[in-house]
Amino acid sequence: MTSAPHLLTDPFLQLPTANSVQVVWFTEFSGKKHIVTYGENLEQSTLAKTNKLSRTREDQQSKVAHITTNQPVKRDIWRHEAKITGLTPGVSVPYRVISMEEHGASVSSNVFTLAANPQPGQKLKILLTSDHQLKPMTAANLQKVVETVGQVHGVWLAGDLVNVSDRASEWFDDSRGGAFFPALQGRANYEIIHNDVKTIYTGGQIIQQAPMFTAIGNHEVMGRLEKTNSLNGEFNDTIPRAVAQKLYSDESLIDNSFNTRTYEEIFSLPQSTTGGKKYYAVTFGDVRLVVLYATCMWRTPKLDTPHKGRYTEPAQNLEQPENWGYGQLIFEPIAEGSEQYNWLQAELNSPEFEQAKYRVVMLHHPPHTLGDNIVPAYTNPVQIIERDPQGKITAIRYEYPKTADYINRDVLPLLEAADVQLLLYGHSHLWNRFVSPSGMHFLETSNVGNSYGAAWGDKKREVPTGYKKDYVAVGDPYGLEPVIPTIAPLLGEDGQPIPYIASNDITVFSIFDTGAGVVTSYYFDTRKPDSDVVKFDEFKLKQN
Ligand SMILES: [Fe+2]
């Protein structure tokens, strides 16, 4: 069979330095040669390095045209990366990529522009986003970003890029048209139907010309390799490293507990000495951005459930420790004294951090929110095993002492002391924001669909009863009042302004304008495809 070769993605920009930037793209053929041509007349060229992704697969739940299978099968995908050097800060240069097959046919991308890392003083518009996960409003959201503010200079994405990280089609070509790269590259084809009116959204052509920095969310993490017969099963099959050590002492600890291999293979990111790409800091224009690896396993809050729970193990698994879920386990320690905490402390004392005009921290897990997922506390689950007089296990539950919340107890005091101006996070699929008494801002701007609502007014979180610790059903469990949007808040049923947007019809995005030091949030009502985007909130960062 012969067909014209095609690129699996457009190229996108990663890891800009003072005089270079990486161009990355993907194909489904290894090819003879892959190059980037660039310069005013595309007269220069750089050869790419090619690597094959090691874990990308499809399975019975994949939605991709040419693959049907009833178990996970490997999908061959090659990643190409070229470092473009000798750039002048502030000067954009046209580029395109060309991939050549073994037998001569070649395919090239359109022409985009690349640039080195922006310098201090350069005014930037940065898109703040998260939790795309192929949700129904993602393509509409990103399309409205470009229609509203034009080309952004950077993208900060606070985790949960896809649903199941090893499922290739979620990144590249899910047949519903809203995969991760197409939505961020203006190549989506996602349909929203409302009142019989069909609207197709293409997403936004964004990351071809704007470097993206990402944080790891719970959806970037895969569980034990090949111990279940589906990728969703594998995603849910995480266990703590310490348990893996006991169960599989002589095998790979990473493959037998949890891993972020595919995420790390797809992205080129700044690295820290202790965390590699998993947590890092970078200077981008006037901003020092610190990215943490702060996320935990999502498990159901239901108590009477056949699934591995947040608060319980299901009855059928009580005698099989290898089948326990171990509650809402935390993937990377961040408590005081941990490697990540020590690295953060050193970063906050570094000249790059101290000299930056703006200091921003991005993490996936919410420090303050009205969303569901802030309860229980961000702390290692305390396992309580109940036995009958014969020693047989009768119940296993997990408690999460709120006083041991690592983010609120350990991390936030450090950030307050270091004059961080903004924390960006996601995970609960809503927009809301908070301000600490010292003026540190907290923003969750992750509304692209599948909202779980806001625990406010009559709406309560699902929290266990009869448990010992403190599980807060309404409001921010850590005591801050949500801020009412400053420009055009939505109104509740009583006609009063509400301090959040949690909707499966109204999508939200936020832009950080580093020239003005202002963060602006916009919403778009997908039920009214011809309606205007509404600027509904704006706040200014505290000046150091
Ligand atoms: Fe999440």
Image (spheres, rainbow, N blue to C red):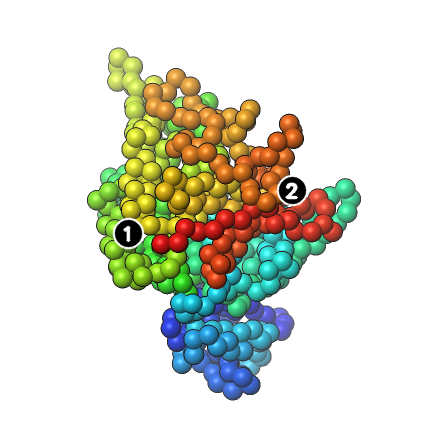
**What amino acid does circle 1 point to?**
Leu
Q: Tell me the distance, in whole angstroms, between the alpha carbons under discs 2 and 1.
A: 38 Å
- Reading the image, the residue beneath label 2 is 505
Residue 475, how many percent across, how many down?
A: 47, 30
**What amino acid does circle 2 point to?**
Asp
SS for dot 2: loop
Can you name the residue that lies furthest to the front here? Answer: 543
Q: Are marks 2 and 1 in contact (CB under 8 Å)?
A: no
Is residue 119 visible in this depiction of the protein? yes
* Residue in the image at 39% along x and 17% along y: 466
Residue 27, how many percent across, how many down?
A: 52, 68
Can you name the residue that lies furthest to the left here? Answer: 337
* Residue in the image at 67% along x and 55% along y: 201
- Lateral position of residue 129 relative to residue 110, left or right: left
Residue 322, how many percent across, how many down?
A: 33, 35
Label 2 or label 1, whichever comes before in sequence order:
1
- Reading the image, the residue beneath label 1 is 344
Instruction: Say if 316 sits above or below 448 in the image.
Output: above
**What quarter of the picture does the C terminus occupy?**
bottom left
SS for dot 1: helix
Foreground residue, 114 or 98? 114
- Lateral position of residue 57 relative to residue 390, left or right: right
- Lateral position of residue 266 relative to residue 176, left or right: left
User: Assess mark 1: CB under 8 A from ligand 1?
Assistant: no
Quarter of the image where one finds residue 286: bottom left
Disc number for residue 170: none
